[in-house]
Amino acid sequence: MVTEEEVKRALKSAVDPEFGLSVIDLGLIYDLKIIDNSKVYILMTLTTPMCPLANAIVADVYQKAKEVPGVEDVDIELTFEPPWTPDRMSPEARKLLGI
């Protein structure tokens, strides 16, 4: 049985190359659900709708989630509502970026 915590741990290694921080620490993951014990649904955003690395970041999130033992399928939905703000970042990420 796959847990949200396992997937979140895996997503800590999915990094936004522009910031050098994980999508978890940046607060890009808005929602994460496990469906039928093996399917992962991720609602996420990017720091900007015009992010030049959007495809690479989403692909990395998909790959990291798919690598979790027991995960059979990953569905990622990209949203920009509500817009991302630095307030969503973890305290550690804010400290690293001097915010």
Image (cartoon, rainbow, N blue to C red):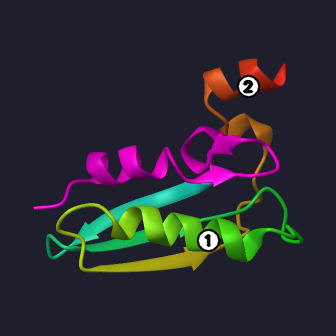
In this rendered view, identify the residue nearer to me: 3 or 79: 3
Which of the marked residues, 1 or 2, is nearer the chain's N terminus? 1
Mark 2 highlights which residue? 94
Q: Is residue 17 magenta?
A: yes
Q: Name the mark nearer the viewer: 1 or 2.
A: 1
Mark 1 highlights which residue? 58
Q: Is residue 3 left or right of residue 60?
A: left
Q: Quadrant of the C terminus?
A: top right
Q: Which residues are magenta?
A: 1-27
Q: Is residue 65 magenta?
A: no
Q: Is residue 19 left or right of residue 88?
A: right
Q: Quadrant of the N terminus?
A: bottom left
Identity of the amino acid at label 2? Arg
Report crowding for label 1: few under 14, some 14 to 19, many 20 or more residues within 10 A (C-alpha).
many
User: Image point 77% across, 59% down: which residue?
Assistant: 83
Report crowding for label 2: few under 14, some 14 to 19, many 20 or more residues within 10 A (C-alpha).
some
3D distance between C-alphas at marks 1 and 2: 22 Å
In this rendered view, identify the residue nearer to me: 98 or 62: 62
